[in-house]
Amino acid sequence: MDAFVYREESGSRVLHAEGVSLPAIAAQFGTPTYCYANGVLVARYQALAQATPNARICYAVKANDTLAVIRTFARLGAGADIISGGELHGALRAGVAPDRLVFAGPGKTRDEMNLALASGVGQFNVESPAELEALDAAARAAGTRAPVALRVNPDVDAETHDKIATGRRGDKFGIDDADIPALYARAAALEGIEPLGLAVHIGSQLSRLAPFEAAFERLVALVEGLRAAGHPVTRINLGGGLGVRYRDEAPPDVEAYGALVERVRQRLGVTVVIEPGRWLVAPAGVLLTRVIAVKQAGARCWAIVDAAMNDLMRPALYDAWHAIEPVAEPAPDDVTVETDVAGPVCESGDVLGRGRALPPLAAGDLLAVRDVGAYGSVMASTYNGRPLPAEVMVRGDALASIRPRQDHEALLARDLVPPWLG
Ligand code: LLP
C-alpha cells in the first residue's frame, strides 16, 4: 500500500499523503516536516500480524518514537521493544501495557533497571554476566523477580551495512553461544531472576532470509541443550531486522518471514516475541522539504533544500539511498536534470541524494524524501543551530500535528550561562 501518490488539487497534480496534499501541509506547518500516513502504519502492522499470528509483536520504538506512532501500534495490540528509560517512559505514555514491554540493549543503568522493575516490564534481554548480577541485585532490593531472556551472539553475519550488523563475534552485542549454558544455570539459581528463555537480534535491514535462518537454528540448538539440562524454556525472542525496499533491494516478503518464525515456534513449542521496527514504519513517512536555491557548479546541478543531515542522518551516516520525488507531478515529456540534493549544513557529507533525475527545480519547489518513517526523526539533531523539524500525521483527510517544530527559543532554553561570566 502506498499512501503517497499524485492526485489532482485545484487544477494540478501534486503528491498527497492519503487524502491531504503535501503543499497544504507545507503551507500549514512549514518545512522541513516529517509526514506519516496512519493508514500505512495500520496496514503494515496488520500484514505482519497476519503473517505471524502466533508471535507477540513488540514494536521497536527506536525506529520512530513519536507517541502517535507508538500509540497507533499499541491500539492494534502491539507491545514495545525499548532501549532506555526514555523509551520506557514514552511507551508507557503511549499506552503500551507494561507486561508487553521488552527492555533490550547492551547497557542498562541501575536507575533504568529500577524504573523498569517498578513499572512491571515483562521481559529484560540480558547481554552479559555482569548485567545479570546487577539486575538480580536490583530485583532483590525491590523485592521482586526480573523476567529474563539471555541475548545470544550467534556469530552470524546479517549481510547488511557494517554499522547495523549486530550478531558477529566482534560486535558488542549479546553473549557468546558457548557461554549460554553456564550463564543460564546461573540465572536459574539467582533469587531475583526468573529465566524465561533466549533472545537474538543479528542486525537491521536484512535483505535475505538465510541469516535469520542461521541465527534461529543456533537458538533452537541452544534451547534444546538447555532443556536437556532441565531448564523449562518457555520464551524466545527473535529480534527485528526485516528489511524494506529503498531502491532495488529485494527483501524477503513478510509471509516468508512469518512462515520461518512459525516453524521455529512449532519446533520449540514456546512463546515467540519479535521486535520489528523499520519494516513497520519506514514506508509510512516522507520528509517534506523546500528548495532554497539552485546552482550550477561546473557540470553539477545542486538543489540546496531546507532539510539537512541533522534532520535525516541516514544518507550521511550509512550512505543510505532514499528516493526523492518532486511534489508537483512532472509531465511525462518533461526534461529531467541530474541533480544533487543537499542541505544547508556546513559539511560536504550533507547530501540527501546524488545525481537524481528531477525536473528542473527552482527556489520554492517542494520535494519529498521517501521511506523515512524509520530512523529519520529519531536520529535528528540540532547541529548548526537548526531546530528539530515538525512532524505531522494524516489519516484519510484528517491532518494533525504530532510534534511541533522546535523554535529558536526552545533551542536556547537548555542553556545556562554561569554567573561568573556576567
Ligand atoms: N531489536 C533490537 C535489539 C535492535 O537493536 C533493533 C534495531 C531492533 C530490534 C529493530 O530492528 P529493525 O526491525 O528496525 O531492523 N539507525 C539504523 C538502524 C539501527 C537499528 C538498531 N537496532 C538505520 O537507520 O538504518
Image (spheres, rainbow, N blue to C red):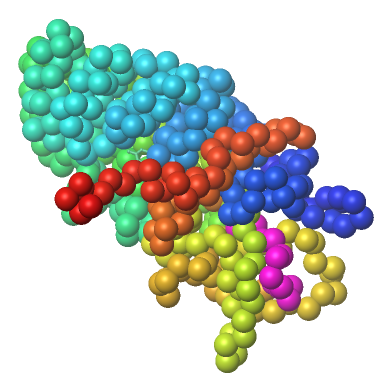
Classify residue 219 as left or right of residue 346.
Answer: left
Classify residue 229 as left or right of residue 9.
Answer: left
Classify residue 165 as left or right of residue 392.
Answer: left
Which image quarter: residue 331? bottom right
Part of the protein shown in magenta: 358-370
Percent of width and height locating residue 339: 62, 76
Percent of width and height locating residue 372: 54, 50
Percent of width and height locating residue 142: 15, 11
Point out the quarter of the image occupied by ligand 1: top left
Classify residue 303 as left or right of residue 83.
Answer: right
How many numbered badges does the structure rendering display?
0
Q: Nearer the viewer, residue 371 or 198?
A: 371
Which residue is at the far right? 11
Say if 321 sits above or below 381 in the image: below
Residue at the spot x=37%, y=16% of the render? 98
Residue at the spot x=40%, y=39% of the render? 62
Q: Nearer the viewer, residue 179 or 340?
A: 340
Residue at the spot x=50%, y=30% of the render? 67
For residue 142, say whether it is visible: yes
On whether residue 217 falls in the magenta region, the answer is no
Q: Nearer the viewer, residue 134 or 202?
A: 134
Which residue is at the far front? 422
Which image quarter: residue 148? top left
On whether residue 360 falls in the magenta region, the answer is yes
Say if 86 sits above or below 7 in the image: above
Q: Look at the magenta stretch and give its main secondary structure.
A: loop
Percent of width and height locating residue 236: 32, 26
Residue at the spot x=67%, y=74% of the render? 357
Quadrant for the N terminus in the image: top right
